[in-house]
Amino acid sequence: MSPIFNHHALRGLSTSELELLKETLRRLLGQENLTERDRINLHAALASVEAVLRQRHAPQAPKPSAPSP
């Protein structure tokens, strides 16, 4: 299994789709028959999904105001 998730692809998913993907990855990680490589790839994919979700939930920094004339 090769890593298939990247931040560009994940940002295209809705938050609900990301949450579903996160839960699916967690369930897959619970399987006993995974190879070490599969486990590493699933952990990496899960970390990528969680990073995008954290970024979406983080408060946005206020935009700097325009300088006065």
Image: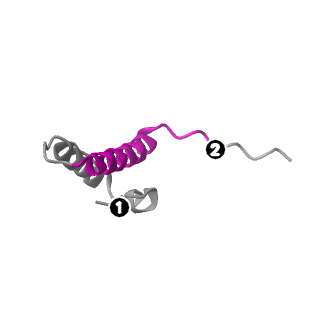
Counting from the top left corner in percent of width and height, residue 58 is at 46, 38
Say which amino acid is labelled 1: Ile
* Vertical comparison of 60 with 21: above or below: above
The answer to which of marks 2 and 1 sits earlier in the sequence is 1
The residue tagged 1 is 4
Secondary structure under tag 2 reads loop
Magenta segment, which residues? 35-63
* Vertical comparison of 59 with 52: above or below: above
Say which amino acid is labelled 2: Lys
Q: Residue furthest left?
A: 32
Image quadrant assignment for residue 67: top right
Q: Residue furthest right?
A: 69
Q: Quadrant of the N terminus?
A: bottom left
Q: Which marked residue is nearer to the observer: mark 2 or mark 1? A: 1
> Tags 2 and 1 in contact by the CB under 8 Å rule?
no
Left or right: residue 28 versus residue 45 is left
